[in-house]
Amino acid sequence: MGIEPKTLEELKSICRLRKRRQDYKETLTRDTVDRHEVYANEMEMISVGKKPDNLRDLIPEGEIILTFNIMYPILFQRFKHVRAYQTLQVLGSQKLSDLRDAICCVSDLQVFGEFSNNPDMVPQFISKDHYKSAFFFFNGTFFNDTRFPECQDISTTTQEWARTRDFPEFKTAKMEDTSFYDLKMKVGFPYLYTHQGDCEHVVILTDVRLVHRDDCLDIKLYPLITHKHRVVTRKCSVCHLYISRWITTNDAFAPTEPCLFCDQCFRMFHYDDEGNKLGDFLAYAYVDPGTFN
Ligand SMILES: [Zn+2]
Ligand SMILES: [Zn+2]
């Protein structure tokens, strides 16, 4: 071939070296499936083409499936206009309250109050159990959640404001008495879901269609979550390992102000063996937005 044996030998050794390096690199490839993907796969395996065990739970022929994108709350700085936080499928015969119960938002898990003196009290104060009022706003009507005695009509503030500014009168209705069949909705139009006083989510209906035999046919699995946007979790500023559960201020032990801690590091730094508080600081429960990943 006109190549000197010496050059040929040199080329061969380069190729061997390259092949060896390539093989080595392949062994370094990590399995990139994370818990978000594992969860998404599991959800899909549970739901796609699922037939119910009991025939009574079979979705009747002719039922419609509505797909809703629930956007990030307006309070959330990033992604608040662009990304769907959750995508849910509901059945036309389901009540608006079923959709409300399926929307998981970090505001429902917030804990109000300062807990540096009694950190074990925290789990008893989740907002969802205390502040149950919520409404959807569809086509000029506020659909309030009135299922519990402590529910209030939190849309009154908006209605009174609108009345003083010559807006047309808004109607109110009960979300638990209204099914999606009762509504006239526009695909792609921004509607509103408000809970916890001012946690406002834009809700967009993206698709309406008849149920298909390849859909999940088990009525009990609806509303069905088909997508969740992943948020990066914020790790403890000490161990950088666990998800933060505490946020402290005025804290002499903390490297930053405010500072995030996991439960273990928080207790290790701020309490002695008997659980007595060390030093002055204020501690609040922190719920990571990545909780639902
Ligand atoms: Zn919310
Ligand atoms: Zn930690």
Image (cartoon, rainbow, N blue to C red):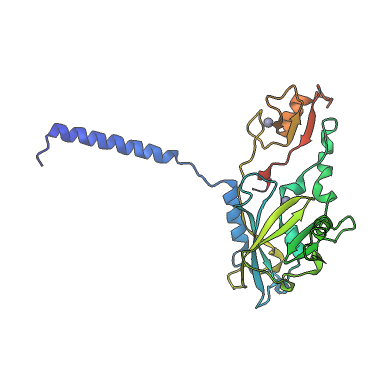
**Relative vertical location of residue 264 with respect to residue 150 in this rendering, above or below:** above
| Relative side of 51 to 161, left or right | left
Quick check: 54 above or below 103? Answer: below
User: In which quarter of the view is residue 208 placed?
Assistant: bottom right
Q: Quadrant of the N terminus?
A: top left
Give the left or right position of residue 19, taking residue 246 as reference: left
Q: Residue furthest left?
A: 2
Q: How many marks?
A: 0
Q: Residue at x 77, y 44 (%)?
A: 110
Residue 89, image quadrant: bottom right
Q: Residue 255 in the image: x percent, y percent?
A: 68, 24
| 272 over 78 or under it: above or below | above
Between residue 24 and residue 251, name the one nearer to us: 251
In the image shown, does 183 or 167 lie closer to the viewer?
A: 167
Q: Nearer the viewer, residue 182 or 237?
A: 182
Work out which residue is located at the far right of the displayed protein and give it: 149
Specify the quadrant of the image occupied by residue 252: top right
Residue occupying image coordinates x 73% and y 22%? 253
**What residue is shown at x 82% (from left), y 60% (from top)?**
163
Where is residue 14? Give x, y as percent. Answer: 25, 34
State the image coordinates of residue 214 (x, y, percent, origin top left). Answer: 58, 70
Q: Nearer the viewer, residue 155 or 24?
A: 155
Question: Residue most toward the bottom?
Answer: 62
Instruction: Give the x, y percent position of residue 223.
Output: 69, 63
